[in-house]
């Protein structure tokens, strides 16, 4: 953003770059709802860069606020802010003012997603841990907590430790590190029968967010499911079977099951699945910008 560019030019002379950046951000006024809608329509209809800039600039405070939620030493808060700003710009590109959702609500999920991707890309620097238990907790803890709550259980450290086969201390430490508003961008497809969630829903933002932000996420969810259904219609034979019975099934078949059905080896079944996932990603990337941020299926047996 221009704010970041100005910081690079003038902020280095200050002792506190973050303070200099915040001073720059405060220079940009907040928009009224009417101004926001008018600018968003102008950008969608004409591609006016000035309109997009005003939309981004008026929401830079939101990026800083969300970056603070995920800030853990030794990560730089400014680095998190910069990644969040990229997410904000992507949200502005895709924002539809006719849906009745405020830009800040819609953008919050994309800002979080970019920040989390940065954290995951800098795994060793964050020092979340390199053991199998810690890696499992990083990706699975929030999902398991939501599943237990949906089933009517208290998500206590003891029960979570038993379910995830880790120590209670590991659960407590990771819970503190993750905070309470984490978004799962690397959760598996498996669904929660009691909560009604589908495996495909696991590609999408957690619902444990404020109601207004959830409205923004619903736009992404609706688009995702619409395009996923379109992709399914392009498949036949083995690919259609693997898609329905493994990739989006609540009780996915194993690669061995698929190999036995079609008289091929487990490795050949894996190759077919890998090619299918690649095609699906390419299909979705063409229709949903930054699809990889909301869908990263994990290979399993």
Image (cartoon, grey):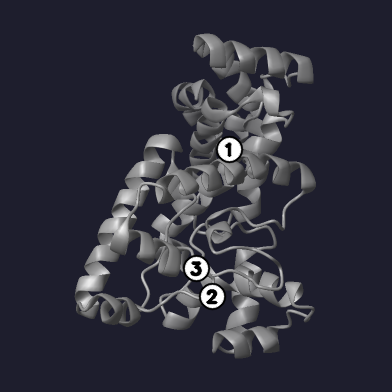
Compare marks 3 and 1 and give the one earlier in the sequence: 1
Q: Position of residue 182 (x, y in %)?
A: 62, 59
Q: Nearer the viewer, residue 15 or 53?
A: 53
User: To which residue does mark 3 refer?
Assistant: 249
Identify the residue at horizontal 25%, vertical 75% (top origin): 262
Residue 242 lies, with reference to residue 39, above or below; the image says: below
Compare marks 1 and 2 and give the one earlier in the sequence: 1
Q: Position of residue 46 (x, y in %)?
A: 51, 9
Spatial distance from mark 2 to mark 3, Cα to Cα?
24 Å
Residue 77 visible in rendering: no
Q: Position of residue 147 (x, y in %)?
A: 67, 73
Residue 217 lies, with reference to residue 3, above or below; the image says: below
User: To which residue does mark 1 refer?
Assistant: 18
Crowd class of label 1 (few under 14; some 14 to 19; many from 20; radius 10 Å): some
Label tally: 3
Identify the residue at horizontal 49%, vertical 12% (top origin): 47
Q: Nearer the viewer, residue 286 or 37?
A: 286
The disc placed on residue 137 is 2
Identify the residue at horizontal 62%, vertical 35% (top origin): 19
Residue 219 visible in rendering: yes
- The local secondary structure at tag 2 comes to helix
- The local secondary structure at tag 3 comes to loop
């Amino acid at each position: 953003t221009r704010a970041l560019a100005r910081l690079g030019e003038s902020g280095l002379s200050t002792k506190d770059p973050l303070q200099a950046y915040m001073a720059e951000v405060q220079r940009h006024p907040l928009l009224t709802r009417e101004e926001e809608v008018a600018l968003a329509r102008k950008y969608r209809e004409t591609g006016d860069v000035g309109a997009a800039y005003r939309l981004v600039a008026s929401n830079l405070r939101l990026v800083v606020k969300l970056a603070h939620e995920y800030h853990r030493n030794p990560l730089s808060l400014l680095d998190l802010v910069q990644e969040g700003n990229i997410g904000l710009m992507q949200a502005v590109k895709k924002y539809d003012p006719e849906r009745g959702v405020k830009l800040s609500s819609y953008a919050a999920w994309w800002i979080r997603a970019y920040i989390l991707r940065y954290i995951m890309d800098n795994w060793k620097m964050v020092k979340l841990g390199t053991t199998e238990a810690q890696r499992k907790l990083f990706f699975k803890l929030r999902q398991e907590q939501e599943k237990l709550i949906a089933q009517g259980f208290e998500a206590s450290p003891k029960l979570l430790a038993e379910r995830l086969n880790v120590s209670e201390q590991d659960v407590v430490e990771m819970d503190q590190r993750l905070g309470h508003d984490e978004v799962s961008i690397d959760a598996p497809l498996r669904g929660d029968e009691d909560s009604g969630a589908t495996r495909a829903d696991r590609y999408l933002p957690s619902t444990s967010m404020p109601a207004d932000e959830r409205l923004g996420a619903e736009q992404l969810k609706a688009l995702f499911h619409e395009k996923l259904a379109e992709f399914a219609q392009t498949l036949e034979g083995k690919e259609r079977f693997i898609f329905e019975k493994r990739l989006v099934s609540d009780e996915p078949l194993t690669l061995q099951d698929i190999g036995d059905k079609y008289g091929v080896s487990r490795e050949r079944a894996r190759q077919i699945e890998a090619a299918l996932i690649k095609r699906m990603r390419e299909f979705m990337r063409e229709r949903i910008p930054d699809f990889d941020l909301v869908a990263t299926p994990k290979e399993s047996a």
